[in-house]
Image (tube, rainbow, N blue to C red):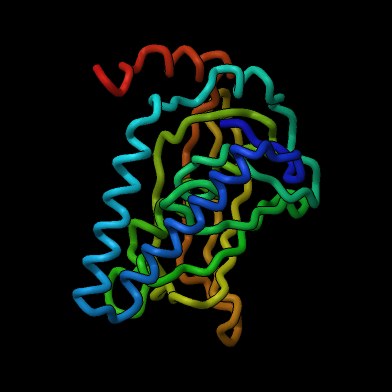
Amino acid sequence: MSLWEAGDELSPDAAARRAAGRAVRDIGHAIVGHVADVELLDEVTATLNALVARLEQGAPRQRSESEFADRTYTPTPTEAHVESYDDRPFSGSASPWGVDLRVHRRGDVVEAELTLRAAHEGAPGRAHGGIVAGLFDDVFGFALGIIGKPAFTGELSIRYAAPTPLHRPLLCRGRVDREDGRKVWITGELIDVTAPGEPVVARGTGLFITVDPTLFAAKTQQLPAPSE
């Protein structure tokens, strides 16, 4: 995983993909979160199906190996606003599945601000547990930037302490707890920052295995092309 300080100049393609990703996220939340008549839903279906057909006429995309070679794995500067690759499922600005994270390093902790929305709902009025787990996995990946080491998730454990609310600001933190050889343990918590006392609604612990950055590209090469 590559991390870099936000503020890098975007290409026209990257800027357009970010805008498209945001629009897809918004329509997903709008469909889930609002009443709509059948006529409107049918129009949405027809419009989206037509756009999908046009998009699928393009050549397959795959993350470039140069993306890994071009990024250095040095510790994230303190107080930096950091991002990762735009298609990253939870934090990527162009991801259709994103949660619109705003990530900063604060000393030895990374802090991710977010607000979960309608399509993130599990039980009525609260976030799906899998969304919370995925959030921790993503934020813990940013915590690896504190030590400047790429790694894969080995284990992830979540303790759900209270319902995670929707439509309210949340703060997810991650910190490196300890290292032992290639093993890195990261811990963190998800906080309801607008509730009295700012209660912790979930706690996470992850075990990550560091890896030589060149192996990321090697692993990518082993995967079959989408058409195979």
* Residue at the limit of the structure toward the right, as seen here: 78
Q: Is residue 6 left or right of residue 157?
A: right
Q: Quick one: which residue is furthest to the bottom in this view? A: 196
Q: Compare residues 72 and 40 and report the one nearer the observer.
A: 40
Q: Position of residue 216 (x, y in %)?
A: 50, 20
Residue name at image x 33 percent, y 18 percent: 225
Residue 103 vertical placement versus 62 (above, below):
below
- Where 154 sits versus 104, above or below? above
Name the quarter where the C terminus is drawn: top left
Please indicate, yes or no, whether residue 41 appears anywhere in the rendered image: yes
Apparent side of residue 87 relative to residue 173 in the rendered image (left or right): left
Query: Residue 91, how many percent across, how many down?
Result: 53, 49
- Residue drawn at (45%, 35%) of the image: 153
**Can you tell which quarter of the image residue 185 is in?**
top right
Q: Toward the viewer: 197 or 53? A: 53
In the image, farthest residue toward the left: 38
Q: Quadrant of residue 177?
A: top right
The answer to whether one can see residue 143 in this image is no
Q: Is residue 145 above or below residue 66?
A: below
**Image spot of residue 142 (x, y percent):** 61, 43
Compare residues 228 and 48 and report the one nearer the observer. 48
Report the quarter where the N terminus lies.
Answer: top right
Q: Position of residue 151 (x, y in %)?
A: 53, 29
Tell me what residue is drawn at x 42 percent, y 72 percent.
164
Which residue is painted at 74% across and 29% down in the image? 74
Note whether 172 is above or below 136 in the view shown: below
Counting the numbered discs, the total is: 0
